[in-house]
Amino acid sequence: MTKKLTKRDYFDDPTLPLQVHIRDPQPEFPLHAHGFDELVIILRGTAAHTVDDRQFPVKSGDVFVIFGAHEHQYQDMHGLALANILFDSHALQMSQWDVRALPGFHALFALEPVLRTQQKFNSRLQLSERQLNHTNEIIHDLKRETEMRNPGYRVMAKGLFMQLTVFLSRCYSDKPSDESIDLLRLGDAIAHIETCFAEKITLDDLAQKANLSKRHFQRIFMECLGRSPIDHLLHVRIQKAAELLRHSNRTITEIAFDCGFSDSNYFTRQFRQIMNQSPGQYRNG
């Protein structure tokens, strides 16, 4: 039976949705899944990594994300040392981070974890020695904050995790391998939605950025994000509008136009459907 790891057992601080474990060496551990996501950085050595019944070789410098629902295990380990950063993306509000403008973020944190077991998308971020050293420094700073818990540690820990996320996302985008090009094209399409949401965006535009047919692009997008590309665009526009409602004095009609809606009545209907309240109620809530 697959072992299920829970947040209650592995997050020492229930008020902080982050936990850092440095495994040096990585011990034998049975096949398992968990109720949180996991960012893995291979610090040293090699192993065979089994994910959902498919096996992948891993080595020093490899970086990847494991979603909680996926079963995985390390086998045939040779001097394997790694850093596990356990995180709750919902509690960290990662859907609102500016790093979502980077195609590498979507490739590493959204696409790879879902598409890893599909042969066509067999890719992985591989850090250079310099990049791995810098990553290791951030990890140790993050671990120190979560363990010492000096005043302000929650803000520092979240800030360091954001810094690490941006750095790794940039590394992914800067020098893509041949295997990661397809994922970065998909990531570029998602980043285009996140950054150009106020503009006219069509399915043809997005599929062209991803270098895929519309049918194939829609299928992969739905599999990874749980909604269609156009539905995702609508949700991004509503989320951006919600931020403006709370943090600006612009009228509801002005905000609707700012976020890509040409009809304020349509905006109000869609806002109510997604947010379960009207724009006015949200602003005054």
Image: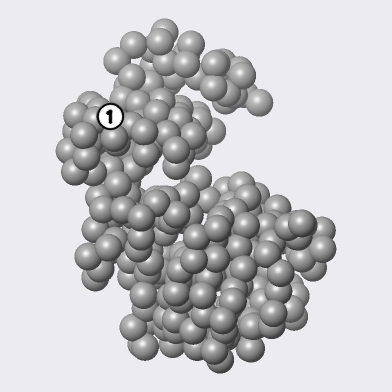
Q: Is residue 251 left or right of residue 171?
A: right
Residue with the most extreme right position? 9
Q: Position of residue 219 (x, y in %)?
A: 36, 33
Depth check: 82 or 49 in front?
49
Residue assigned mark 1: 215
- Judge whether 220 appears above or below 124 on screen: above
Q: Residue at x 22, y 65 (%)?
A: 178
Q: Residue at x 37, y 69 (%)?
A: 125
Residue 114 visible to the viewer: yes
Q: Position of residue 105 (x, y in %)?
A: 39, 57
- Judge whether 40 appears above or below 250 on screen: below
Q: Callout 1, which amino acid?
A: Arg
Q: Position of residue 34 (x, y in %)?
A: 69, 57
State which quadrant residue 262 falls in.
Answer: top left
Residue 236 visible to the viewer: no
Q: Residue at x 48, y 11 (%)?
A: 269
Residue with the most extreme top position? 265
Q: Position of residue 63 (x, y in %)?
A: 45, 71
Chosen colour scheme: one colour
- Judge whether 216 appears above or below 48 on screen: above
Q: Secondary structure at mark 1?
A: helix
Query: How many numbered marks are there?
Result: 1
State which quadrant residue 199 falls in.
Answer: top left
* Quarter in which the C terminus is drawn: top right
Q: Is residue 269 left or right of residue 219?
A: right
What crowding class fits label 1: few (fewer than 14 Cα within 10 Å), some (14-19), or many (20 or more)? few
Q: Residue at x 44, y 38 (%)?
A: 223
